[in-house]
Image: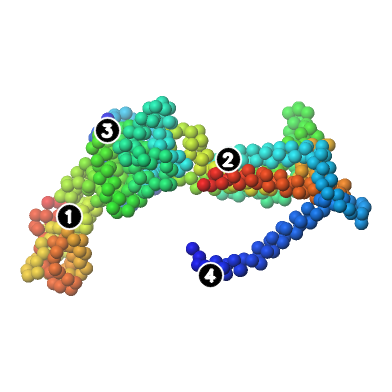
Amino acid sequence: MATLQTRASARLMMTPAVVLLLLWMAVPLAMTLYFSMLRYNLLMPGMEEWAGFLNYRFFLTDPAFFAGLLNTLLLVGGVLAISVGGGILMALLLDQPFFGQGLVRLMVIAPFFVMPTVSALVWKNMLMHPVNGLFAWLARTFGLQPVDWFGQAPLFSIVMIVSWQWLPFATLILLTALQSLDSEQKEAAEMDGAGALSRFIYIVLPHMARAITVVVLIETIFLLSVFAEILVTTNGGPGVQTTTVTYLVYVQALLQFDVGGASAGGIVAVVLANIVAIFLVRLIGKNLD
Amino acid sequence: MGEIRLEKVHKAFGTTVVIPEIDLEIADNEFVVFVGPSGCGKSTLLRLIAGLEDTTSGRILIDGEDMTARAPAKRGLSMVFQSYALYPHMSVYNNIAFPLKMAGADKSVIEEKVRNAARILNLTDYLDRRPGQLSGGQRQRVAIGRAIVREPKAFLFDEPLSNLDAALRGAMRLEISELHHQLHTTMIYVTHDQIEAMTMADKIVVLNAGRIEQVGSPLELYRSPRNLFVAGFIGSPRMNFVQGPEAEKLGAATIGVRPEHLELSTGDGYWKGKVGVAEHLGSDTFLHVDVDGLGQVTARADGEIGLRHGETVFLTPIRERVHRFDDKGEAFS
């Protein structure tokens, strides 16, 4: 416990950083709030006028918004399901002793280091391309009709690409959690007559619960803002099939030059992210007692 | 029933031989303690019996049935681990109930057995708590409770008291001994602490580098240790060993005298020495005496003895309590 004096001086020394961070956050937020109340289009410079909540009305009643909201939820949910489920399986596999374990563990993390734009392009042009892609070649080898991934299952394709990037992260965190499990606990369960599946359900999974919550929280924060993968592959299409809320804000601001509408969209996205955050924090609070 | 027999049990990890070859018989309802210094293979031997390690060769028979290749859960044994290995996310009740649940027992049967175990172990008030909210001794009892409910043929204890403080260790020692009398079940207990071995065991198995040095009741080992290792390991403080001319006088390469078998006198005696450190325990005093020509010898004296550092004292070994060892370290008489 700190004394009164050290606490006071600690506060004093922290002040510049806290003030800077606060300004950093507060100023853009205030500006966005202000812009969202303006009729502000880049094609009509100097014509800004007060619009009240009109921008919000237009954004929230835009049919693309509901599609975007649904797509965002599907994308986040899909990637979370695949990366956590797959991560658990991968972690269980990598926890087994086998030859070349160190090298394999190192390579498993590799996709996480590839920048999103690059990995999306690799997937788009080398793997999922309906003519030149590896999947198409595989399909033809077996005499099947190649799948036009971004045409027939665009959102699923993006979920695949993003999952591929996040699977290593989940695997790594879950693997470290798995390795911190006391081996005597597993042996005790074995002596108690628990089979492999029971041991997993009653001992391993509860032990990993904390790590799983951390993975879910961190991934959700980043997945809500997935953008590069969509821009590079489908541009939000076909139609609005892969338009997420984040992408919709981009469309408003930089394709339709509607700064006011985009700002309103941005505020809506912030509110949505906060709703998700409240749920997650409560979930974690329960798990981290 | 819980008769365990090891036949030519051999264990090696790769090229490292942990247990060269062991034959051992453990009778039903016996309290057997495996004792030895760290790394002597006592825990490995226990894990072999439990089935947590595979034997490299040899057979393990429980009640006459060959269990060498049987899964741990199918051997009918329960184990209490050094770290207790409680399941941290489950309540005490669920911890104790876990083996029954895995065996697919009825809810009402589980309830009855858990309550019964909790009553024996004084855990009834703690059934709703998590292991993290319990003290060391209570955790230990939960681990024992989890072992009891399966009604095993034998209990295996792997250094269960080493994480407890001295006072608690003494109390738990009594409780485990008491439990053995209540349950009438075979118990195998691994420890490096010879006091635990001496106080609890019906039969002590002294292990050194994977070999059995001697098997016998605590007093047998104390009275007639077979070799230097057992002589030095059993008994506290350690037996004094003397080599050279003093030993040759008795026709041995080494002689051993326990501290309690030395008579002290300030006037006259066999060996003359100077008192070094004196440890006053109240009931006893242990004197570390520098004997001329022999080096340091430990002697036990009355608790209220008035000797001080630097004073001269005479030690006389009781002749019939002197152990003689040949040049290979084997005892002879």
Q: Which residue is mark 3?
A: B3
* Callouts 3 and 2 on one subunit: no
Q: Are marks 4 and 3 on the same chain?
A: no
How much space separates mark 4 and mark 1, taking CA atoms? 70 Å
* Residue drawn at (82%, 51%) of the image: A37
- Say which of B300 and B174 sits in front: B174
User: Which type of secondary structure does the marked residue at label 2 adopt?
Assistant: helix
The image quarter containing residue A149 is top right
Label 3 neighbourhood size at 10 Å, few (<14), some (14-19), many (20+)?
some
Q: Secondary structure at mark 1?
A: strand
Q: Is residue B321 left or right of residue B166?
A: left
In the rendered image, which residue does mark 4 sit on?
A5
Q: Are marks 4 and 1 on the same chain?
A: no
Please name which of the two marks, 4 or 1, marks the residue nearer to the observer: 4
Real-space Cα distance between discs 2 and 1?
Answer: 61 Å
Residue A188 appears in the rendering? no
Which residue is at a point 17% across and 55% down the rendered structure image? Answer: B325
Q: Identify the residue at image location x=74%, y=46%.
A: A269
* Front tag of 4 and 3: 4
Q: CA distance from mark 4 to mark 3?
A: 69 Å
Residue holding disc 2: A88
Nearest the eye: B220 or A144: B220
Disc 1 target residue? B325
x, y (%) of residue B330?
A: 19, 52
Q: Is residue B212 above or below residue B3?
A: below
Amino acid type assigned to the residue bearing label 4 in the image: Gln
Q: How far from the left and from the top, in percent, is residue B200?
A: 24, 45
Q: Quadrant of the N terminus of chain B?
A: top left
Secondary structure found at label 4: helix
Task: Please state which amino acid type lies under the numbered disc 3.
Answer: Glu
